[in-house]
Amino acid sequence: MFTDLHNHLLFGIDDGAPNPEASLAMLRRAVDCGISAVVATPHAPDLMNSVYAGLINRHFRILQNLIETEGLPVNLKLGAEVFFSERIFDWLDEPWATLGGTKKYLLFELPLFEQRLPVADFIFKLQIQGIKPILAHPERYLYLMDQTRLLEQWHEQGCIFQINAGSLTGSFGRTAQQFGLELLERHMAELVASDAHDDDRRSFAELTRARDLLAPVIDEEYRERLFVSNPRRVFDGEPFRPEFVLPPAGRKFALSRFFRKIGLA
């Protein structure tokens, strides 16, 4: 059974589900895809305030009650996709700040087009407080494609990388797909998540589709960690160590080459 740690199913908060019915439709799709545990992660922007935070908590309680009423076999917890800013440390006591409220893992995102604040300092300070940072979809930050050594440094510091399933299937274009595949080739990713926004083009089904696409080129043990065991450990607040394996010098990326060969990259 799958665990999904990044999605926007919590209704009426961001660009995800617009209403409770849409949230329930997304969750039904999740169950159909074999997902039994989900952390709802609405956007927590840098302009976060008490009104927005209260809305997240209130809508989460409503959705929990609806799941119980519907009898959906899914374990739902609350988290957030926190926008990286100097204010992050002001929010750590909020129930949504860390995934599942465990105070063990925090999912954060960077600006899509430019990053100026010192991420390395943030990674260091957060881990001093016992919280592991998880960088959402590093393959989508195109400015990092030319700064792979910076990514390596963050990863070596202990930052966990979460790849979007939709990136691997090509939903975000070839560049993000190839970058995501290269990160997998280096074993620089520990988690794959859906980043589901709806029950159509960006649904939970991307998670199972990505896992199936990777079956011919990723060994089953690594694939199981990406899609099953590591996400479950995060959900339960249990520790695991990031991996880091560079390919031999001069080696081209077999995953990217394979997907190009079959017309998927």
Image: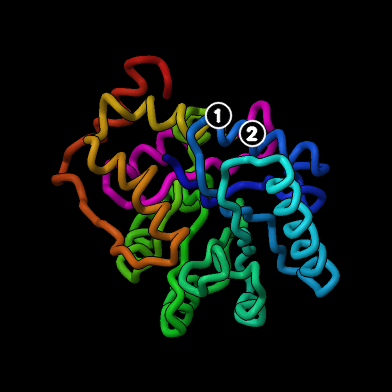
Q: Amino acid at mark 2?
A: Arg
Please tell me which residue is depicted at 33% across the width and 60% down the height of the picture. 152
Which residue is disc 1 drawn over?
Answer: 32
Please tell me which residue is depicted at 16% across the width and 41% down the height of the picture. 250
Q: Is residue 78 above or below residue 86?
A: above
Q: Quadrant of residue 148?
A: bottom left
Front one among 200 and 229: 229
Q: Residues within 10 Å of mark 1 (few under 14, many from 20)?
A: few
Kindly indicate whether the residue at mark 2 contacts the one at mark 1 (C-beta within 8 angstroms).
yes
Residue 153 in view: yes
Q: Residues within 10 Å of mark 2 (few under 14, many from 20)?
A: some
Q: Residue 72: where, in percent of width, then height?
A: 63, 40
Q: Quadrant of residue 74?
A: top right
Task: Say if the magenta span includes residue 106.
Answer: no
| Quadrant where the image shows the C terminus | top left
Q: Which residues are magenta?
A: 176-203
Q: Is residue 141 left or right of residue 62?
A: left
Which residue is disc 2 drawn over?
Answer: 28
Task: Say if the magenta span includes residue 182.
Answer: yes
Q: Is residue 230 left or right of residue 108?
A: left
Please tell me which residue is depicted at 61% across the width and 31% down the height of the picture. 29
Q: Amino acid at mark 1?
A: Asp
Please tell me which residue is depicted at 44% across the width and 44% down the height of the picture. 192
Q: Quadrant of residue 30?
A: top right
Local secondary structure at mark 1: helix
Q: Where residue 54 is drawn, which disc sits there?
A: none
Local secondary structure at mark 2: helix
Q: Is residue 83 above or below residue 196?
A: below
| Quadrant where the image shows the N terminus | top left
Front one among 92 and 21: 21
